[in-house]
């Protein structure tokens, strides 16, 4: 599905990512874990086309996407829910969701896509007429994920979906993501808190100072004392 | 009072005005309606897409000169031909201008539009044989819907058939723009204005959409420019001068760019206020400069913003 192969990313003169590689298969949930500043968001932003790798490749279903503009990558089937939610304040909840069905018309019928978005986060239905600034942080996170889902993507890229949420709202977001996995979408989650890594995660990547230092099942990561010192302290 | 009711009453007042209002004030309605068409288009770019153009007088000039050129060199007299030709000429000029401008945002976009406006201004000023130079070109009275109406006294023509013709064009332009801003395309423009980087993640090609918005706004400005021709009877380079573009931005700010009808209200207030201030003091720009400063500092939402703020208080008073 998604293949990131040995990418090196620079921001101005700073070498941010060093030969980062990761794979996300069809219907897989993969987590990229690391401390703040380790390179998680840079990896995701490179996948989404905001940054260009100086070396290496990013492929979606075998097609190279590195160097393509972000809107083309989105139309190829990558749904993005950014860390800051990225809700459009002048649009209602309903419009935030519906707009994805228009900007990427290919795929399932619009009505079905909208229904799936509301099914994953049923609470949003009540706020359909509200605008972004009238919503809590948790509701905005849910809307951000629902909007990405309404794009009917092959894969969702979620940047810190639990960041800044109150413990009371985290289960609702977590259940929503679990529901999305049942719909057959692949998911790549970047997370700085190891305790938020969902139990249905197939594979874990740990990133530290721009390098992948672990790739494997989450349970293997917990068995490695050196690794748990790092990802434990990420909590 | 709901917005819809206010709109119906305003429309009714405009329709009955020729029977009750003095001719002088009716004549002022003609530039108002022409500018209202221009500003509906400009606000698609300004209020809905977040791009402030300081060069839209260029397209008013294109529209007005297209009509005058057709009349002077090809002896065309049909207002419908003028409007269609103005829209086509505006689109043809806007296509490359927009393609260059929409790659930039904020002050760079504004300065580029200003630069293209000044290039056109210089063109119409210097190409005397084609444009009449600083004297401009006459804009003879056009036939409306195939009726020549040449026998009619000019004032009767302007406050009668031409008044309603302009109103019809404004009504069609308003309905068209209402559909545009309420469509998914309009929503996409809002997402681009609010956060272009995030809009891209929805599959929106930001540069392409900005180009579409620029094209639509240029066509509106050109049609509005053609409508300005008959009331003045002459087109000259000042139509394309940068201060004219500044007036368009002023009208938009005065009415409020956050509201669909804000710029239309801005055009109305600007024209009648300018007329009144000019009759009282010679330094009307001094007064207007002060008004602009007050709006920007105390009422950034313009007059429509003030009305919106006042509305809850009315409700509370019962």
Image (cartoon, grey):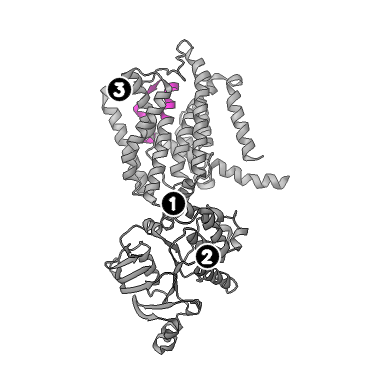
Q: Magenta stretch?
A: B224-243
Residue A126, horizontal then vertical, whole percent? 63, 59
Out of B267 and B84, give the one closest to the viewer: B84
Number of labelled discs? 3
Are the residues tagged 1 and 2 within 8 Å (C-beta)?
Answer: no
Q: Residue at x 52, y 65 (%)?
A: A141
Dot 1 and dot 2 within a common chain: no
Q: Chain of mark 3?
A: B
Same chain check for tags 3 and 1: yes
A69 vs B74: above or below: below
Q: CA distance from mark 1 to mark 2?
A: 20 Å
Tag 1 residue: B192
Q: Give the residue number, with chain letter if any, for mark 2.
A: A141
* Residue found at x 50% / y 69%: A181
Please tell me in which quadrant of the rendered image residue B308 appears: top right
Nearest the camera: B48 or A62? A62
- Residue to which mark 3 is pinned: B132
Establish if B191 lies above or below B134: below
């Amino acid at each position: 599905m998604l293949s990131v192969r040995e990418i090196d990313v620079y921001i101005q003169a700073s070498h941010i990512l060093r030969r980062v590689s990761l794979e996300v298969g069809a219907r897989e949930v993969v987590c990229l874990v690391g401390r703040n500043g380790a390179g998680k968001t840079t990896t995701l932003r490179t996948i989404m086309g905001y940054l260009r790798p100086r070396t290496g490749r990013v492929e979606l279903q075998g097609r190279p996407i590195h160097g393509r503009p972000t809107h083309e990558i989105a139309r190829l089937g990558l749904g993005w829910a950014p860390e800051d939610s990225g809700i459009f304040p002048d649009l209602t909840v309903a419009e935030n969701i519906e707009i994805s069905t228009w900007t990427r018309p290919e795929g399932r019928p619009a009505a079905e896509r909208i229904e799936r978005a509301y099914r994953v986060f049923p609470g949003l239905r009540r706020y359909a007429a509200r605008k972004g600034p009238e919503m809590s942080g948790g509701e905005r996170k849910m809307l951000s994920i629902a909007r990405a889902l309404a794009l009917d993507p092959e894969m969702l890229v979620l940047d810190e979906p639990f960041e800044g949420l109150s413990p009371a709202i985290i289960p609702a977001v977590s259940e929503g993501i679990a529901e999305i996995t049942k719909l057959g979408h692949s998911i790549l989650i970047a997370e700085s808190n190891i305790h938020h890594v969902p139990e249905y995660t197939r594979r874990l990547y740990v990133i530290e100072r721009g390098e992948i230092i672990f790739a494997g099942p989450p349970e293997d990561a917990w068995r490695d004392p050196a690794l748990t010192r790092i990802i434990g302290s990420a909590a | 009072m709901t917005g819809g009711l206010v709109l119906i009453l305003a429309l009714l007042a405009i329709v009955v005005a020729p029977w009750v209002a003095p001719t002088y004030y009716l004549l002022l309605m003609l530039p108002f309606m022409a500018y209202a068409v221009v500003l509906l288009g400009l606000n698609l770019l300004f209020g809905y897409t977040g791009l402030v153009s300081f060069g839209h007088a260029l397209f008013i000039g294109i529209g007005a000169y297209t009509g005058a050129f057709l009349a002077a060199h090809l002896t065309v007299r049909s207002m419908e031909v003028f409007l269609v030709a103005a829209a086509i000429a505006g689109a043809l000029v806007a296509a490359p201008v927009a393609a260059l401008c929409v790659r930039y945002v904020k002050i760079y976009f504004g300065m580029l539009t200003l630069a293209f406006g000044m290039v056109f201004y210089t063109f119409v000023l210097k190409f005397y044989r084609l444009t009449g130079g600083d004297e401009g070109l006459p804009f003879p009275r056009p036939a409306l819907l195939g009726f020549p109406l040449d026998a009619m006294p000019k004032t009767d023509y302007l406050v009668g058939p031409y008044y309603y013709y302009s109103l019809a064009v404004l009504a069609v332009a308003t309905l068209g723009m209402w559909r545009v801003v309420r469509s998914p395309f309009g929503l996409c423009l809002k997402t681009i204005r609010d956060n272009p980087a995030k809009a891209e993640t929805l599959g929106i090609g930001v540069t392409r959409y900005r180009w579409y918005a620029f094209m639509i706004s240029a066509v509106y400005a050109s049609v509005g420019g053609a409508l300005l021709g008959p009331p003045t009877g002459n087109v000259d380079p000042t139509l394309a001068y940068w201060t004219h573009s500044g007036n368009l931005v002023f009208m938009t700010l005065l009415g409020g760019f956050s509201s669909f009808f804000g710029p239309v209200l801005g055009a109305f207030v600007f024209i009648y206020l300018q007329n009144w201030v000019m009759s009282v003091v010679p330094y009307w720009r001094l007064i207007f400069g002060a008004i602009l400063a007050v709006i920007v500092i105390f009422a950034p939402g313009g007059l429509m913003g003030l009305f919106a703020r006042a509305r809850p208080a009315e409700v509370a008073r019962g």
